[in-house]
Amino acid sequence: MSRADAAGVSQAKSALSMMGAIVIALAMTQPAGAATFAVDDSTSYTHDANTAMKWKLVAPSRRLGSLVEGTTLVTVRLNLMPWANKNGKIYMALGKQAIGPVKATWTTQGRLLAGQLNSGDRTLVYAGPIRTAILEDTITLTIETDGQRLVSAQRLQFTFEIDVD
Amino acid sequence: MNRKVSAITRMIPAAMLAAMGLIHESVSAYTVNITAGTRIVYLAVGNGSFTGTLQGGGTPANNAPVNTVSVTVAANVVGTGASQLMTTNSTQAASFWDGFAFCTPATQQVYIGGFFRMPGAAGNATLTVSTPVGGLVNAGGNTIPFSQITWVSSGNGDTGAEVIPSGTFTGGMQTLASLPVNTWNESCHTFSYLNANVVAAGTYTGRATYTLSAP
């Protein structure tokens, strides 16, 4: 191997090392750049104290034998003051449930996005500039789960979080 | 000095996590309280009623008329032991489960089907039938024991054991089947008169009442 060759190898190694360092640096800074914060929705409220779950089909069948569903209205009020004049993506989230998978679907009056959410996941409900301190919408929320696992009343706690650009 | 270092080392992980957006402040969440599904029990013997279709989310309905099974035994056959097939006025062929032509009324099959809904995956409903201990009675007070009436259970396309199996009335209360929760159960029964006894002429009647009891 000539010295020139050796230098080339050395440069190549150096370049590889630098690339590694850059990749690591990006990985470290990416989350901080798109930080996620919990959104205060303490003034949100459900219109019904309890949501009565009904069998999706009155009689059992092969396909949907044990699903139950219930619908309620929720007035969502999100305090976005900490992120005023920034761009962000707001998500509604529901943690994993002891009763197994829970699916929530909702329609809105237009300020939030309609969507669907499975327990243990989150779904986008707003994306864009934050121009108001309180973002309010009333959603029609339908809950669906396995009636064979839902043997007693359960509390489903929905949360909101924001990814700030 | 040691205390300072200790404090710093405790703070660093929290600061790092906060910078990475992994720590959320605790804020309230709206809560939806959901209740368990309601209990429902449904049983159809002979003609049943359903509003709409099951696949379309239909609802079982009450069907007041009581179907009959009957047979006229020729005088020269009475008491010979020659089993007599009983005919029915039931016209229920389709299963409300999926609309499938499960029973064949033309061959005197009587549809029997039902289900019960209950939150949870455990539990069985009990299907019983009650017939008068005194048997079938004619206008003269003569009787024929209900044990002279038997049925064969089947269903179009069925394989294996029937959920409501073949049997014979015992006179009194008897258990026919145990139906698991949140499942549809159905069979078609074809009734026969065993014709084992010489009895007085007349029309003998009696009612069999089927009951599905859920826990």
Image: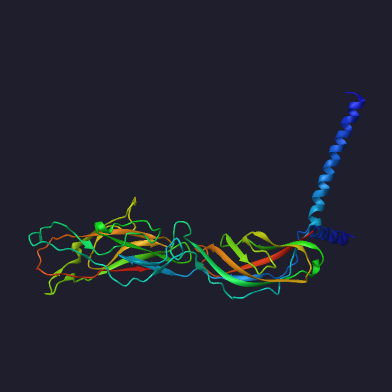
Taking the spot 84% from the left edge, 45% from the top edge, the residue there is A22
**Is residue B7 left or right of A101 when viewed as pictured?**
right
Mark count: 0
Taking the spot 61% from the left edge, 65% from the top edge, the residue there is A106
Residue B3 is situated, as x and y percent measured from the top left of the image, at: 86, 62
Question: Please, which residue is most extreme toward the top here?
Answer: A1
**Is residue B207 left or right of A137 when viewed as pictured?**
left
**Is residue B4 left or right of B156 when viewed as pictured?**
right
Residue A159 falls in which quadrant of the image? bottom right
Dividing the image into 4 quarters, which one contains the C terminus of chain B?
bottom left
- Residue B215 shows up from this direction: no
Q: Toward the viewer: B42 or B88?
A: B88
Question: Please, which residue is most extreme toward the right here?
Answer: A3
Residue B214 is situated, as x and y percent measured from the top left of the image, at: 39, 68
Question: Please, which residue is most extreme toward the left here?
Answer: B76
**Is residue A11 left or right of B196 when viewed as pictured?**
right
User: Which color scheme did the rendering employ for the protein?
Assistant: rainbow
Q: Toward the viewer: B205 or B181?
A: B205
Q: Toward the viewer: A39 or B96?
A: B96
- Residue A6 shows up from this direction: yes
Dividing the image into 4 quarters, which one contains the N terminus of chain B?
bottom right
Image height of A161 relative to A29, above or below: below
Residue A84 falls in which quadrant of the image? bottom right
Residue B125 falls in which quadrant of the image? bottom left
Q: Toward the viewer: B209 or A57?
A: A57
Residue A158 is situated, as x and y percent measured from the top left of the image, at: 65, 66
